[in-house]
Image (tube, rainbow, N blue to C red):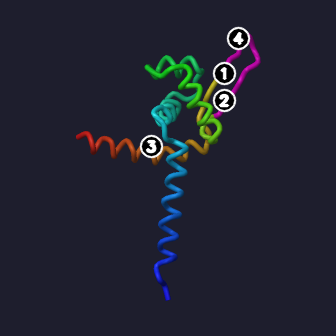
Amino acid sequence: MDDGTNSMCEKQLEIVKVAEALAVISGKWKPTILIYLRYRGVQRFSEIKKNLPPITQKMLTAQLRELERDGLVTRNIYPQIPPKVEYSLTAYAETLQPVLAALRAWGEQRTS
């Protein structure tokens, strides 16, 4: 006899998984950074900073580190003086594109 326990466990698991996914992409700047890198490709820190005003250097550094930690952004350091650092999306981040497109469409509906 099904007392609804399996259904409740599935719902709780869904809530947990959605919360985990949102934790990876949440933040004022993470979605913006992901979309920017998708359309601009490989970018240096200074290019990202210049094109995402009014983000502070501290905030951009923190957001990029979190995105790198979560496997969405790759950071390539070139051994030269001054050091050259470039950021790009990982293949894993590319799997987020349908989600970001759906969020954009939802936002467009909401504002129209």
Q: Secondary structure at mark 4?
A: loop
Q: CA distance from mark 4 to mark 1?
A: 10 Å
Q: CA distance from mark 3 to mark 4?
A: 35 Å
Going 48% across and 37% down the picture, which residue do you hit? 27
Q: CA distance from mark 4 to mark 2?
A: 16 Å
Instruction: Tally the marks.
Output: 4
Q: Which residue is mark 4?
A: 82
Q: Is residue 5 magenta?
A: no
Q: Looking at this view, name the residue that lies furthest to the top.
A: 81
Going 71% across and 15% down the picture, which residue do you hit? 83
**Quick one: label 3 or label 4, which is nearer the N terminus?**
4
Residue type (three-letter) at the residue carrying disc 4: Pro
Q: Secondary structure at mark 1?
A: strand
104 to the left or right of 9? left
**Quick one: label 3 or label 1, which is nearer the N terminus?**
1
Q: Secondary structure at mark 3?
A: helix
Q: Position of residue 88 (x, y in %)?
A: 60, 31
Query: Mark 4 Cα within 10 Å, few/some/many (few <14, many 20+)?
Result: few
Q: Which residue is mark 2?
A: 75
Residue type (three-letter) at the residue carrying disc 1: Val
Q: Secondary structure at mark 2?
A: strand
Going 54% across and 19% down the picture, which residue do you hit? 47
Numbered range of the magenta stretch: 74-85
Q: Looking at this view, name the residue that lies furthest to the right.
A: 79
Q: Which residue is mark 1?
A: 85
Q: Position of residue 34 (x, y in %)?
A: 51, 35
Q: Position of residue 75 (x, y in %)?
A: 66, 29
